[in-house]
């Protein structure tokens, strides 16, 4: 089979986000450390799945298969991932080990109210940044990669609130984009005022190599100087630090807790799924349902409005 040219490989890789490329590279490294090769047989892939069963989650194994398939595609080989033996092995692993995924606990409005209050040990600038970051993350139902990728030019204000223009994302890899509206709220949970306060403060912050359209949320050193944009992992770290500072148990919470928190809180308030989807960008109502957590059987019960 002919190998693909460098240009073809480059375009194939451009079809994946940077995060996905990093994940695939890590997965392929693990596969090769186990003894796998590109190309390989379907039996080799099935043996790899069996060796990892019980150690890796089903979702992780599925991603490993995608990485192996991508590795074959970029090298110009036919992928063995879709073969019957591989599919049958994965089905068996699902039956034996289950498919339950570990989910981030949702941030509640009550918790958010506590988290956005100033922390005495943190600088004024850090408190402003964290408050805006958490409120915008919650109000927009953003993923951590989306939050980290926002730029100052992504934000516009109207008399009814703020609008954030979101470019390429996990569910919009082609960068069609969408607008996420955030209306004014009551203090101290108003994301619009928090964002305005943060933007007003950052205009006074010097930064090396300043760009015309800098990252919306930036690092701040101990001297009050603004650095580059936050990385994905920093979002969860900031949330964790504030939870600890406020005496809240951080176990089970991550940056994804902001997105899960909005969906859960909106569902409890009776917001229809289509409206939640418009805010979060979920592609299906099924995915929205997966994000609704801690909803008790009698909350928003279908029979309540009938009888």
Image (spheres, rainbow, N blue to C red):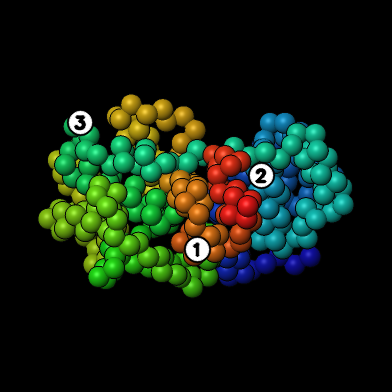
Q: Percent position (x, y) of residue 169?
A: 49, 61
| Whether label 3 touches label 2, CB < 8 Å | no
Q: Percent position (x, y) of residue 171?
A: 55, 62
| Badge 2 density bin: few <14, some 14–19, many ≥20, Cα 10 Å | few
Query: Image point 61% across, 65% down: which residue?
Result: 12
Residue 207: quarter of image: bottom left
Q: Is residue 84 above or below residue 7?
A: above
* Alpha carbon distance from label 1 to label 2: 28 Å
Of 222 and 14, the residue lying toward us: 222
Of 109 and 4, the residue lying toward us: 109
Residue where numbered disc 3 is placed? 121
Residue where numbered disc 2 is placed? 59
Nearest to N terminus: mark 1 or mark 3: 3
Query: Image point 68% across, 31% down: which residue?
Result: 55
* Alpha carbon distance from label 3 to label 2: 39 Å
Is residue 113 visible in the rendered image? The answer is yes
Residue where numbered disc 1 is placed? 275
> Nearer the viewer's eye, disc 1 or disc 3?
1
**In this rendering, position of residue 132 left or right of residue 83:** left
Provide the secondary structure element on which disc 2 rests: helix
Nearest to N terminus: mark 3 or mark 2: 2
**In this rendering, position of residue 252 left or right of residue 137:** right
Nearest to N terminus: mark 1 or mark 2: 2
Provide the secondary structure element on which disc 1 rests: helix
Query: Image point 34% across, 47% down: which residue?
Result: 134
| Badge 3 density bin: few <14, some 14–19, many ≥20, Cα 10 Å | few
């Amino acid at each position: 089979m002919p190998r693909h040219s460098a240009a073809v490989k480059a375009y194939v890789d451009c079809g994946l986000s940077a995060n996905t490329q990093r994940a695939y590279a890590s997965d392929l490294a693990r596969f090769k450390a186990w003894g796998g090769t590109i190309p390989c047989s379907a039996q080799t892939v099935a043996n790899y799945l069996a060796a990892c069963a019980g150690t890796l989650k089903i979702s992780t194994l599925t991603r490993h298969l995608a990485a192996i398939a991508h590795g074959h595609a970029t090298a110009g080989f036919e992928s063995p991932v879709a073969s019957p033996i591989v599919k049958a092995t994965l089905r068996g692993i699902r039956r034996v080990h289950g498919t339950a995924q570990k989910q981030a606990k949702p941030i509640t409005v009550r918790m958010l109210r506590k988290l956005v209050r100033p922390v005495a040990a943190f600088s004024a600038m850090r408190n402003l940044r964290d408050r805006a970051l958490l409120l915008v993350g919650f109000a927009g139902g953003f993923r951590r990669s989306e939050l980290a990728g926002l730029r100052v030019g992504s934000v516009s204000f109207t008399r009814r609130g703020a609008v954030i223009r979101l470019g390429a994302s996990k569910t919009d890899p082609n960068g069609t984009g969408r607008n996420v509206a955030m209306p004014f709220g009551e203090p101290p949970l108003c994301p619009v005022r928090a964002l305005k306060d943060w933007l007003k403060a950052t205009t006074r912050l010097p930064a090396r190599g300043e760009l015309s359209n800098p990252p919306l949320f930036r690092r701040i050193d101990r001297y009050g100087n603004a650095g580059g944009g936050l990385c994905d992992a920093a979002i969860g770290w900031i949330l964790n630090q504030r939870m600890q500072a406020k005496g809240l148990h951080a176990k089970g919470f991550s940056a994804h807790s902001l997105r899960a928190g909005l969906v859960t809180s909106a569902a409890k308030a009776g917001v229809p799924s289509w409206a939640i989807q418009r805010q979060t960008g979920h592609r299906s109502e099924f995915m929205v349902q997966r994000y609704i957590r801690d909803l008790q059987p009698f909350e928003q019960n279908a029979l309540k409005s009938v009888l």
